[in-house]
Amino acid sequence: MMPLSNINIKSPESALETLKLFRIIFKSATRHFHEIEKIAGIGGASLWAMAEIAENDNLTVTGLAKAMSVHQSTASNLIEKLETGGNVIRTRSVEDRRLVNLSLTDLGREVMAKAPPPYRGILPDALMRLSPESLLELNRHLTELVSNMELKHDSSAFEPLGGA
């Protein structure tokens, strides 16, 4: 790859060099998801959900959806699959019977112990480690990029990248 200092900003090569970076990002994320499935037997989104549950006592489906930035229905579907697989249990809150709290089972903890970190995925992990200034600038540039796309699927903003 060409060093950024050697790129003519107005050339097509500049766009192609940036495209290469997107390829590296998405291919790396995809390979990490495949590694998770191969080693732990679950998808990347499921592992992320389990990590959130492990780190947050009394987490609800609504809280999980917020923590993963997905639709509540997506979080519910993830939990349904994890519960069916014996990795997660739902328990009614003693204080407020309307709330259902999520927790990992022993099997869920075993699956997490086998899985390669970072549990949230390499892309969310890298984004969370950026400085606030860098993240703001990246967000601004990606927003501009998306606005320049003729075909875009805005609804995919709340869908996980990794398989369930």
Image: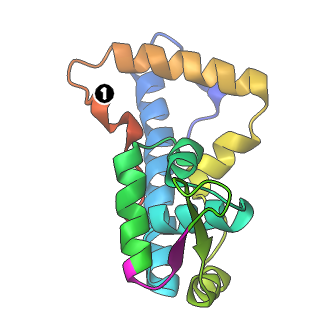
Quarter-wise, where is residue 57 in the image?
bottom right
Task: Give the answer, above or below, for where 92 lies relative to 135.
Answer: below
The residue where tag 1 is placed is 154
State whether residue 161 appears in this view: no
Task: Give the answer, above or below, for where 113 lies relative to 58.
Answer: below
Considering every residue shown, the one lying at the far top of the view is: 10
**Quadrant occupied by the N terminus:** top right
> Residue 20: x percent and y percent?
45, 41
Quarter-wise, where is residue 164 in the image?
bottom left
> Residue 124: x percent and y percent?
60, 48
Considering every residue shown, the one lying at the far left of the view is: 151
> Residue 64: x percent and y percent?
55, 52
- Left or right for 86, reference 1: left
Quarter-wise, where is residue 51 in the image?
bottom right
Q: Name the residue: 47% across, 67% down.
A: 46
> Residue 6: x percent and y percent?
62, 25
State whether residue 78 appears in this view: yes
Q: Name the residue: 36% across, 14% down.
A: 147
Q: Amino acid at mark 1?
A: Asp
Element class at badge 1 = helix
- Left or right for 135, reference 30: right
Task: Give the answer, above or below, for where 90 lies relative to 157.
Answer: below
- 45 within the magenta span: no
- The span shown in magenta is 84-91
Q: Name the residue: 60% across, 56% down.
A: 122
